[in-house]
Amino acid sequence: MQKFLSIPVTNEQNQLVSCNDIKLIEQASTTTVTIAYGGGKVITLTHAAVAAGSEEMRDAIQDGVVQVLKQQWTEVILQMGSLPKAVSGIAIA
Amino acid sequence: MEKFLNVPVFKLLASGTTDDDGSPTDLIDSGADFVADGVQVGDIVHNSTDNTYHTVTSVSATELGVTGGGIETSKAYFIHSANISNSQLVSGSGVLLVEQATTSTVTITYDGAASADVVTLTHVPVASGSEAVRDLIEDAIVKGYSSSWTDVSNDVSTLPNQVIGISIG
C-alpha cells in the first residue's frame, strides 16, 4: 500500500515524496529536513529557515506521514498545503 | 503496514566546553549564560568527552552545581531539559533486532542491507547490566503492531531514562 506526501515546491509543481519504509525524519539543519528510508536512501527537503533549535518543519512532515498512513488505502496522497515554511527543493541521494 | 514509535527527545538547552576545573561539584564555562539558556535544577548534563552524565543541582550564569563529581576543564558538554521534549518518530517496521548497546544507547537494526539501517537512541544511562530502555522499546514495537492499523504512531516513554538524541547510520 503506497502512500505519498504531495509537497508544494517554490516555482515548481507539487512533488510526491514516499511515506513507505521511512526509518527516521530529522531536522538536519535550520533549512533542511531529511527523510531516511530503509536501504540507505535519503530525501532532503530544502526550505526557508526555521529558528535555531526549532523542529517545526520536521514535525509538520512527521504529522503528514502519520496522517496519510492512517487514511484509507484509496487516498494515496496527502496534500501538504500548510507547511510552516516554503520548500524550495527536494533531492534524493 | 507502517508503524512508528513516537519518542520524546528532551530539548538541548546549552552546549560548550568547560574552561575551568569544576570538580568535585561544578561545571564552569565563563562564556556561558546558563540562566538565559533556561537551565534549571534537575536538568541533564552530558559530558561527551568522557561520556558521563550528571544532574544540575544549582544554577548561576557561568557555573552549574552538578552531581557525580563535577566536570574538569576542557570537556565538551551538552545540557538537556529534564522536562521539555519534542517527539520524534522512529520506525517500528522492518525491525530485526533491538539492542541495549551501552548503558546510554539503544540501537534498532532494520532489515535493509545498508549500514545506514541502524537507528541509535541516546538516553540517560541505565544501571550497568540493565536493559530497561531496550525492553521499553521492544514493548512499544509489540504494542504498535497489536493495535489497529490506523494507530500509526504509538507513544513511548523511557522515563526516568530520558532520550536526548536520535540518529541514523
Image (cartoon, rainbow, N blue to C red):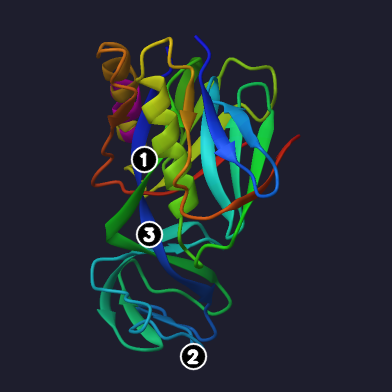
Secondary structure beneath label 2: loop
Secondary structure beneath label 3: strand
Chain under disc 3: B
Q: Give the quarter of the image for residue B144.
A: top left
Mark 3 or 1, closer to the camera: 3
Residue drawn at point x = 69 percent, y = 17 percent:
B113
The tag on residue B62 is none
Q: Give the quarter of the image for residue B67.
A: bottom left
The tag on residue B11 is 3
Vertical placement of residue B126 versus B129, above or below: below
Residue drawn at point x = 30 percent, y = 46 percent:
B161
- Labels 1 and 2: the sequence-earlier one: 2
Q: Quick check: is B136 in the magenta stretch?
A: yes
- Labels 3 and 2: the sequence-earlier one: 3
Q: Which amino acid type corresponds to the residue marked 2 in the rendered image?
A: Ser
Q: Which amino acid type corresponds to the residue marked 3 in the rendered image?
A: Lys
Q: Are marks 3 and 1 in contact (CB under 8 Å)?
A: no
Mark 1 or 2, closer to the camera: 2
Q: Marks 3/1: CA distance?
A: 25 Å
Residue drawn at point x = 60 percent, y = 33 percent:
A36
Mark 3 or 2, closer to the camera: 3
Chain under disc 1: B
Q: Position of residue B71 (x, y in %)?
A: 45, 74
For label 1, the residue is B128
- Labels 3 and 1: the sequence-earlier one: 3
Q: Marks 3/2: CA distance?
A: 22 Å
For label 2, the residue is B30
Residue B134 visible in rendering: no
Vertical placement of residue B120 versus B144, above or below: below
The N terminus of chain B - image quarter: top left
Q: Residues within 10 Å of mark 2 (few under 14, many from 20)?
A: few
Chain under disc 2: B
